[in-house]
Structure formats: structure tokens, C-alpha cells
Amino acid sequence: MNSLFSLVSSNHHVSLEDLEDAVLDGDVLIDCLTDEELFWLRHGEATTDPAMDEPYLSTLDAHSRQVATDSGLRSLIAKGMVDVDPEEPSTLEFAGAYSVLADLRSSAPIVTRLRLDVRGDESIRYAFGLVSPSLVLTEEVADGGFHDFILQSPPAAASALGAIFDRHGTAGPKSERPVRAAHRDDLTPNGDELADRSMHTVLLRSTRGQGGSSDLAVSVNGTRDGVYLSWSESGDRPHVRIRLGRPDLEAAALDLILGDSPPA
């Protein structure tokens, strides 16, 4: 697996075209950062998206949070991730690969965020940031507040997302026809029944930034008899549910990463 550190030149620069070429040979590893380190990567601004919160920092009171973020800054400085101006200590400049990561993370015009809940296990959060038509920044976040980053091609990211949708390998060989209803409770199977027999659930939101207005919400239920996707769209029967087969899971995942509704 390639590393972003090996791609960033001595002058701390790498072009978007170089990154797009690199993912054609496989995923590009970046690093694992903690909540308290990413607090500074965002220049101290906490995310407002509930699907990508700060799993560790959010459990702390104000004093403990201050201690943790101060420790995070010391960690960044010790590892050479940031440069601090002694005359303006509140001003941080990220170095090398971490500067590239900060730019990629903030520049994605479409971000698909989700939370995976598995019965009896911890929740895991993911973000798929479409940086360009050929490049996706994928972030995996555990409950302990550890964030793993990799760069992927859109097909590789879609394969990863499709595997999350079919975590238990229960998707059938083909998809069924979508069910549409005017009211969510009229979908088949109904929401309560689906929730009761789900082995895992995924709540997903794909958002267009930089002036875009698209905001798509999709829920995924993995049951013993298949994987169900549910979402809303315009029309007289806006609520849609479909049981997707294995061949269509990755196609649906790619559409979501691109900010589009699943095929139905």
C-alpha cells in the first residue's frame, strides 16, 4: 500500500493529479489521528454533523476537554505535524502530508457520512469525501475517537461501502423491485419489523457543500434475508425501499458517494 508521506515532496507539496494516479495502484495510506489531534486540524472548530462527531471528546466535561485538546496539540508538535509561530502561538501551520490531509478534508464538495451500528458491538463512523471525480478521502472513526484515513479511487471506495452495507453477507443474488408509498409506515416491510430483525443498521447522509443544496438521507438494514435500503424522493409516493442484491450494492454505494440517489 502506498503512503501519502512517500508521495509528498521535499517542499511539502503533491498535486491532485499525482494523488489520482497513485490510487490507481491501490489505496494510499495516510495515518491514524485522534479526536484531540483532529480538533486542531479543523483549527479548533468542532464538526456539527452528528454522524461524524468526536466520539472521545464528546464524553468529556469542559475542563477535561481542554486538557485533552492541549495534549493533542503537544502530540502534534512532538511528531512534527505542525509548526507554531512563537509570536502567535494560536496560529498553526500543518506540515507535509498533514497539510495535504487538512486541505483534502476541507475541499471535498460531496461528503457521504454514515454510522454503522451492530448489535452487541461498538458503533463505527465513516466519511467518504469526493475530492475529485477520481479521488475519495475515506475516514473510519471508532468509538474511542481514533480516525483512520486512506485515499481511494471511487470504485474502491464503493466496494468498501458496499461491504459495510452487506456486513453479514446476506444480500441475495439479485435485487427486487422497489416498493414506493406515500407514507413511510406503508412501506413493506414496515419500519418497526425491519428494525426488530436487523443484525446491523447504517444511517447515511450525503451532502453537497460549497453552495450546493442537495442533502440525501438513506437508511440501510442488514437482515438475515437481505439488505434493505430506504430513502425519500420527490413525487406522490416519496418513500422508497428496495432489497438490493449483491451485484447492485456497489453501484448503489457509488451513487451515494457521488451524491446521487440509489438506483430504483
Image (spheres, helix red, strand yellow):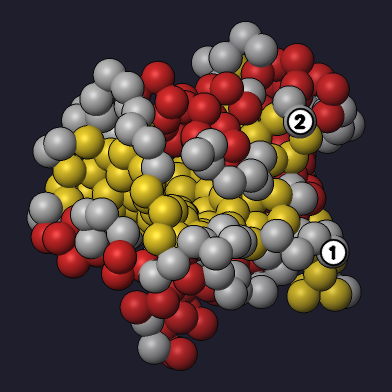
Circle number at residue 133: 2
Helix, strand or loop for disc 1:
loop
Q: Is residue 105 left or right of residue 93?
A: left
> Which of these two is toward me, 22 or 79?
22
* 66 or 50, nearer to the observer: 50
- Whether 231 is drawn above or below 97: the answer is below
In the rendered image, which quarter is residue 137 located in? Answer: top right
Q: Does 216 sit above or below residue 257?
A: below
Q: Position of residue 263 (x, y in %)?
A: 53, 37
Label placed on residue 211: 1
Which amino acid is tagged 1? Gly
Specify whether 190 is left or right of 90: left
Which x, y percent locates residue 27?
56, 21
* Residue 123 in view, yes or no: no
Question: Residue at horizontal 64%, vertical 51%?
Answer: 111
Q: Are marks 2 and 1 in contact (CB under 8 Å)?
A: no
Residue 92, above or below 63: above
Label 2 vs label 1: CA separation? Answer: 18 Å
Is residue 166 toward the left or the right of residue 43 in the image? left
Badge 2: how crowded within 10 Å, few (<14), some, or many (20+)? Answer: few
